[in-house]
Image (cartoon, grey):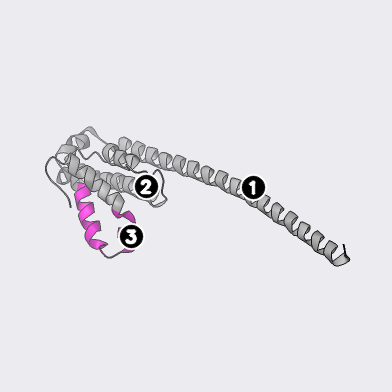
Amino acid sequence: MELIEIAQLVTGLATLIVASVLIWQMIIQKKALDIAHNDADANMSLQAMEIRSKTNEWFEDNLTPEMIEKFDKGFDSLTPKERHIFQTYFRNILRTLSTEWRLGRLIDEDQIYYKGTFNMELHFKDKLFREFFKEYWMNSDQAEANSSKTMRYADLMKLGVEIYNKESSGEKLD
């Protein structure tokens, strides 16, 4: 074997060793990124639950027996302060839900988490919640008809409309 052949052999082995080390580092980085992703997802889930819990707690603290009785009477029956309390609650729930949707949290084929939130948090069985969602839906649908935001949240809002239509006893949104 000549010196050139030995040099080429050593260079080839060195290249193979360097490539192996780089592949090994990539595998380690992938594992670290997977761990970071899982941690971020867990953190996002905890924050979403904390926000929702605080929103519900705040709403419960501000509810009065008189306001609860007005749930079946509709939005017009509320006093200005009650309207403010209700709108704040409703918008906070939708804002949190929209953020979770945008970040891809718990999106599955059946959208169970989101349907459950519309059912349990937004109480479409009560006239007040249905009226406010309908008004919100109509305004957001018209105001953002040509906006890219509409496309981003279109499927989420369709789920809301689906639950609304199911709970509204006859009245349907498109």
**Coordinates of residue 50 in the picture (x, y in percent):** 43, 39
**Range of magenta residues:** 132-154
Task: Tell me the kind of residue under disc 2.
Answer: Thr
Label 3 SS: helix
Q: Is residue 132 above or below residue 7?
A: above
**Coordinates of residue 25 in the picture (x, y in percent):** 67, 51
Q: Nearer the viewer, mark 1 or mark 3?
A: 1
| Residue that badge 3 annotates | 149
Residue at (23% x, 52% y) in the render: 136
Whether label 1 touches label 2, CB < 8 Å: no
Describe residue 93's horizontal placement relative to residue 20 as left or right: left
Residue that protrudes farthest toward the top in the picture: 65
**Coordinates of residue 28 in the picture (x, y in percent):** 64, 47
| Residue that badge 1 annotates | 28
For disc 1, the neighbor class at 10 Å (few under 14, some 14 to 19, many from 20) is few
Task: Tell me the kind of residue under disc 1.
Answer: Ile
Of the numbered discs 1 and 3, the one sitting upstream in the chain is: 1
Residue 146 belongs to the span the image colors magenta: yes
Q: Nearer the viewer, mark 1 or mark 2?
A: 1
**Coordinates of residue 17 in the picture (x, y in percent):** 75, 54
Quarter of the image with the N terminus in it? bottom right
Choose top left, top right, bottom left or bottom right for residue 79: top left
| Residue that badge 2 annotates | 96
Residue at (31% x, 35% y) in the render: 60
Q: Nearer the viewer, mark 3 or mark 2?
A: 3
Residue 83 belongs to the span the image colors magenta: no
Task: Tell me the kind of residue under disc 3.
Answer: Lys
Between residue 108 and residue 54, name the one nearer to us.
Answer: 108
Between residue 121 and residue 60, name the one nearer to us.
Answer: 121
Residue that protrudes farthest toward the front in the picture: 1
